[in-house]
Image (cartoon, rainbow, N blue to C red):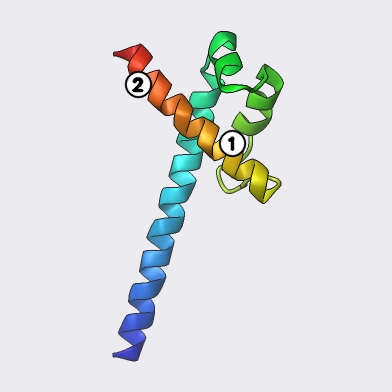
Amino acid sequence: MLVLNKVNLSIRRLVKCLALYRARRRSRQALLGLSDELLRDIGITRAQAYAEGNKAFWQSGTQAKRSSEKYSKTQSFFALKKRITR
């Protein structure tokens, strides 16, 4: 029973990790597709967008505070993009 619990826990961790990687990739690809005007709206430059967008999916932000700020901006971007594309 203990072995099954460990396997189950490992599988759950793997699924969470893969979901995180997928979300990072999608967010970064979407960031690269933004116009300069939308980038200005969320407070980043084209160079910052390229730097973030060209990271590999397994790479996180460089600093914890900056990562949370970028995550927040990315989430704002998705909300804005949904309104624009509808």
Q: What residue type is labelled 2?
A: Lys
The disc at residue 22 is none
Residue at mark 2: 82
Q: Where is residue 71 in the image (x, y as percent from the top left)?
A: 53, 39
Name the residue at 36% across, 77% down.
7
- Name the foreground residue: 58 vs 40: 40
The residue indicated by pointer 1 is 70
Q: Residue at x 56, y 22 (%)?
A: 42
Question: Which residue extends farthest bottom?
Answer: 1
**Left or right: 38 as drawn, with respect to 50:** left
Q: Tell me the crowding category of disc 2: few under 14, some 14 to 19, or many 20 or more residues within 10 angstroms, Cα based.
A: few
- Which quarter shows the C terminus? top left
Examine the rendered structure and indicate whether residue 60 appears above or below residue 29: below
Label 1 is placed on what type of residue? Answer: Lys
On screen, 53 above or below 19?
above
Percent across and percent down for residue 6 are 38, 81
